[in-house]
Amino acid sequence: MSLLKFFVKGRSAPVARDRLQVLLAHERTLAGRADLAEVLQGEILEVIARRIPIDREKVIVRLDRGDQISTLEIDIEMPAGALTPT
Amino acid sequence: MSKVLVVTSGKGGVGKTTSSAALGAALAQSGQNVVVVDFDVGLRNLDLVMGAERRVIFDLINVVQGDAKLPQALIRDKRLETLWLLPASQTRDKEALTEAGVERVIDDLRARFDWIVCDSPAGIEKGATLAMRFADAAVVVANPEVSSVRDSDRIIGLLDSKTRLAEEGTKIDKHLLLTRYDAARASRGEMMKVEDVLEILAIPLLGVVQESPDVLTASNFGAPVTLHNPASPAARAYADAARRLMGETVEARSTRPERRSLLDRLFGRKAAAA
């Protein structure tokens, strides 16, 4: 049994190291991401509000990080007539 | 110039309290005036590990809230004149700790001691962030195990953003203390090696404490391992770490496993010393 185990047992440490490296690379970019979305939301709103009256509750800013591309999604609902020239 | 050192890890059970006691004692054994402060409010254990559990009258919360003066709450170690303990409260909750209160106590301690070793609670909540808040340097305790290393990475992020030094734009000194290391298992590829953890966490190594029965024996007796069994490998590792904290250059000890005969290995026998 011991003899068999000695030869067969897989080396698990490299697996642990590789999994951690992948995970932490991801988590480190994540750190502060929540804050970033909040900051972006505030600043984008500020710029838009200079030109168009908008309801702050009706703005959604979402950051999504994918393997290939990441997306920044900004969804602003504008009141009727906001774009009609005065 | 006194130094505030936080001993932290994120994950529980990796050896923060044991390491705080051992490092504190090792610093005191080199003649430094040391206080070890337990920040684990509600779950204090440093008093027990240091063998002072029957001498606690006042605690950190009492001092923070002004119910007791600092000298009333400080407990002097019975074995070492230069080693002191400031216990945590066992009955209160961590909400009783305030940032302003902790800052005042740390400032008072700076006036009396060379080293203020803050034993952080596990987690990333208020107790842990207050323990690191006013630190000049940090010892990140980790085991060579995935969850511990991940949590350490998280804690390193907090040390770089939530401490006062970080907010002032200065990077806090961070040191890795790898505990419960089993060199034999690491050499067989069953456990991450020191180098693996160092590469992942990317902070300088303060020391490697090998898995050892001496650590448990010392805490059973209520003594820091550097006091209880100074000749043991664990105590020597902590003593080396303390010297490095004091700025000395101490050569790394070998973390290679003791050699076992081929027969022992084939039949799964443990080395006699283990």
Image (cartoon, coloured by chain):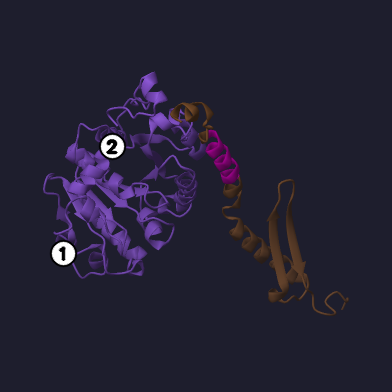
Chain colours: A brown, B purple
Checking the image for residue B238, the label placed there is: 2
Looking at the rendered structure, whether the residues under marks 2 and 1 are on a common chain is answered as: yes
Q: Which residue is mark 1?
A: B57
Could you tell me which quadrant the C terminus of chain B lies in?
top left
Q: Secondary structure at mark 1?
A: loop
Q: Is residue A69 above or below residue B201?
A: below
- Seen in the image, is B107 located left or right of residue B194? left
- What percent of the width, then of the height, locates residue A12? 52, 36
Q: For marks 2 and 1, give the CA distance.
A: 29 Å
The stretch of residues the image draws in magenta is A14-25
Whether residue B86 is visible: yes
Magenta segment includes A19: yes
Quadrant of the image occupied by residue B244:
top left
Q: Characterize the local packing of mark 2: few (<14), some (14-19) or many (20 or more) Cα atoms within 10 angstroms.
A: many
Q: Chain of mark 1?
A: B
- What percent of the width, then of the height, locates residue B175? 39, 40
Give the farthest residue toward the right: A85
**Residue at 55% from the left image edge and 42% from the top image edge:** A20
Q: Characterize the local packing of mark 1: few (<14), some (14-19) or many (20 or more) Cα atoms within 10 angstroms.
A: some
Q: How many marks?
A: 2
**Residue at 43% from the left image edge and 61% from the top image edge:** B125
- Seen in the image, is B160 located left or right of residue A33? left
Magenta stretch: helix, strand or loop mostly: helix
Amino acid marked by disc 1: Ile
- Seen in the image, is B54 located left or right of residue A16? left
Amino acid marked by disc 2: Tyr
- What percent of the width, then of the height, locates residue B157? 49, 49
Could you tell me which quadrant the N terminus of chain B lies in?
top left
Q: Earlier in the sequence, mark 2 or mark 1?
A: 1
Q: Secondary structure at mark 2?
A: helix
Magenta segment includes B73: no
